[in-house]
Amino acid sequence: MFHHFTAATARAAAGAALAFVLVSSMSACSGTSGSSDATGSAQGRIAIGVKLDQPGTSLKVGNDLKGFDADVARYVAAKMGYQPSQIDFKEAVSAQRETMIESGQVKFVVGTYSITDSRKQRVDFAGPYFIAGQDLLVRSDDNSITGPDSLNGKKLCSVTGSTSAQTIKTKYATGVDLQEMDSYSKCVQALAGGQIDALTTDNVILAGYAAQSQYQGKLKLVNKPFTTEKYGIGLKKGDTATCTTLTEAISTMISSGEWQKSVDENLGKGGFTVDTSTNPPTPAANCGN
């Protein structure tokens, strides 16, 4: 009886050992960052979608990511138990954000991501953590563009998949030559080079570009915001637990003073003034809605 139990145990142990070897081999083939699960997290790591080319909000500088959104991403990740060294930042251009979340390439996206009803059909949002407004960036010597109603006959640039481009299409399409690119940095280069007349997106993003050394004195913010953009952290639809954790982390960042510290360090440049009547916002507990 005792001998039979030992043999069965040995067979079970051998099977477990073989399973471990197979799993280990599969993991070793998956790459150095570990095998990601369906939520964008790898063993001991987390993947976060961000912009890499937006000064003030999220700009890659060498091996570092600087800006307000970058600070928010690191803060909420820390509240989830991840150190900065455990974060894998992945570029999430506007048109790919929902797909990256749905496919599990990232756990969540912090990338000047406006909360809209249409986007909430595909992803959930924690927040908002900042409220901006759509505006226009023009060349400093151009006084002909004073707002969206003065764009008739003008070449306007925005980014594919952005709420800014959609707003122009639905409200100001008549007479506007809208050209869509895959990044705002390309639009800024075209504006500075004279290929387009104006760039439109949120004022905080535009101000960041205007403040860059190569554009100082060459570009200016019109400073006539014509929408309200509530930035949220986008995540997989139905992941209520993570959504709740993120929303609580945003609230703590605001109440602790870290939110204001990051705003002071990163925003308020290039002619942009943070609207204190709407900021800091009150994160809403609307996860799963």
Image (cartoon, rainbow, N blue to C red):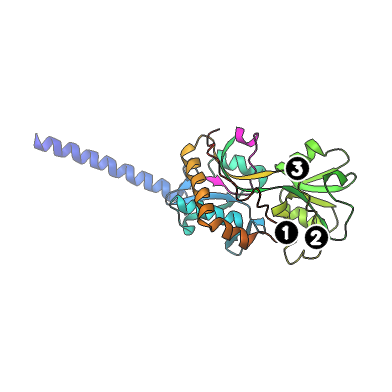
Examine the structure image and report whether residue 111 is included in the region drawn in magenta.
Answer: yes
Give me the residue at 57% from left, 60% from top: 261
Label 2: which secondary element: strand
Q: Which part of the image, by quadrant, shows the N terminus?
A: top left
**Which residue type carries mark 1?**
Tyr
Residue 75 on image: x %, y %: 51, 54
Q: Nearer the viewer's eye, disc 2 or disc 3?
A: 2
Q: Residue furthest left?
A: 1
**Residue at the (67%, 43%) spot, across then down:** 95
Q: Position of residue 282 (x, y in %)?
A: 57, 45
**What residue is shown with label 2?**
219
Depth check, front residue: 161 or 132: 132
Q: Is residue 108 magenta?
A: yes
Q: Residue at x 55, y 53 (%)?
A: 72
Above/below status of 28 relative to 11: below
N-terminal of the two: label 2 or label 1? 1
Q: Which mark is residue 165?
A: 3
Q: CA distance from mark 2 to mark 3?
A: 20 Å
| Up/down of 122 relative to 48, above or below | above
**Crowd band around label 3 with a 10 angstrom C-alpha radius: few (<14), some (14–19), many (20+):** many
- The boundaries of the magenta stretch are 107-121
Q: CA distance from mark 1 to mark 3?
A: 18 Å
Crowding at dot 2, Cα within 10 Å, few <14 / some 14-19 / many 20+, comes out as many
Instruction: From the image, tell me which residue sits under label 1.
Output: 209
The x, y position of residue 154, in whole percent, is 88, 47
Side (left or right) of 91 relative to 287: right
Give the structural element (helix, strand or loop) at label 3: helix
**Magenta highlight: main SS:** loop
Give the residue type at disc 3: Ala
The quadrant of the rendering that contains the C terminus is top right
